[in-house]
Image (cartoon, helix red, strand yellow):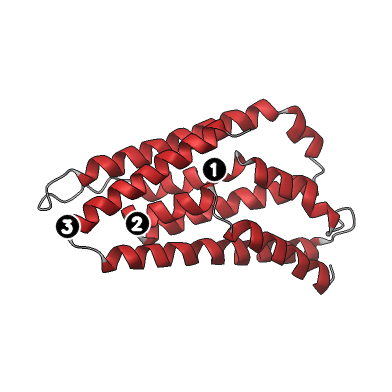
């Protein structure tokens, strides 16, 4: 595919990724509450969801996506529930005594990854971008394997770069304000943001 088409797609994707939305709020909250590594795991899940929709666009699955709208609604509700649960755990952790370390639960990064994946799969904005908007500047009927790999690399670089940038800034800010009083309020704020994000994801069409 041409460099111009790839650059146009990258700009559109960057605007979509940098605009505050459920994925940004979830990744930032995860970075504040659990650190950069957990936020990075969630970012990988978000990217995988984007790649799934790109594959769907290549396969001409727009009609399938429309026919199975209820399935995407269920995925969205599962992602919303996971975000609310994460937020609730963060708020509960903020009430522990400063001397009591929060327990490290096995599989936290795995849960963050799955939540990021479900968040993207249940996001109507992602569906609209990959199944409706993307074909307007990328001819999916003529794209070859090299072109598909170029698009995949662009998705990984743009979405990953934006979300990891948000995560790094959030984790750094949390580290600078690591005194117990600040930590408690950051956990409560991040947890509330996750719960609010989950509620927004659940109620949007």
Distance in Å between CA atoms under marks 2 and 1 = 19 Å
Residue holding disc 1: 119
Q: Secondary structure at mark 1?
A: helix
Residue 147 position within the rendered picture, expressed as x and y whole percent measured from the top left? 79, 64
Q: Residue at x 61, y 41 (%)?
A: 123
Which residue appears farthest toward the top when viewing the image? 70
For marks 2 and 3, the one nearer the N-term is 2
Image position of 181 (left or right of 111): left
Residue holding disc 3: 180
Residue in front for this viewpoint, 167 or 57 = 167
Residue 25 in view here: yes
Where's the C terminus, which quadrant? top right
Residue 188 position within the rendered picture, expressed as x and y whole percent measured from the top left? 29, 46
Task: Mark 1: give few (<14), some (14-19) or many (20+) Cα within 10 Å.
Answer: many
Residue in front for this viewpoint, 120 or 200 = 200
Q: Quadrant of residue 40?
A: bottom left
Q: Secondary structure at mark 2?
A: helix
Residue 92 position within the rendered picture, expressed as x and y whole percent measured from the top left? 24, 40
Q: Is residue 203 above or below residue 107?
A: above
Residue holding disc 2: 32
Q: Residue at x 9, y 53 (%)?
A: 99
């Amino acid at each position: 595919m041409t460099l111009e088409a790839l650059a146009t797609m990258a700009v559109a994707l960057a605007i979509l990724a940098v605009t505050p939305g459920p994925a940004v709020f979830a990744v930032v909250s995860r970075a504040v509450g659990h650190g950069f590594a957990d936020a990075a795991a969630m970012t990988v899940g978000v990217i995988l969801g984007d790649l799934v929709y790109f594959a769907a666009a290549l396969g001409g699955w727009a009609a399938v996506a429309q026919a199975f709208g209820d399935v995407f609604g269920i995925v969205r509700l599962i992602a919303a529930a996971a975000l609310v649960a994460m937020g609730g755990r963060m708020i509960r952790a903020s009430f522990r005594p400063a001397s009591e370390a929060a327990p490290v639960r096995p599989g936290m990064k795995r849960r963050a990854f799955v939540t990021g994946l479900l968040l993207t799969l249940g996001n109507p904005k992602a569906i609209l971008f990959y199944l409706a908007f993307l074909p307007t500047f990328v001819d999916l009927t003529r794209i070859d394997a090299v072109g598909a790999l170029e698009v995949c690399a662009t998705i990984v670089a743009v979405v990953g770069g934006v979300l990891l940038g948000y995560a790094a800034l959030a984790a750094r800010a949390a580290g600078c304000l690591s005194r117990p009083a600040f930590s408690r309020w950051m956990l409560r704020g991040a947890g509330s943001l996750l719960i609010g994000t989950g509620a927004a994801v659940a109620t949007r069409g």
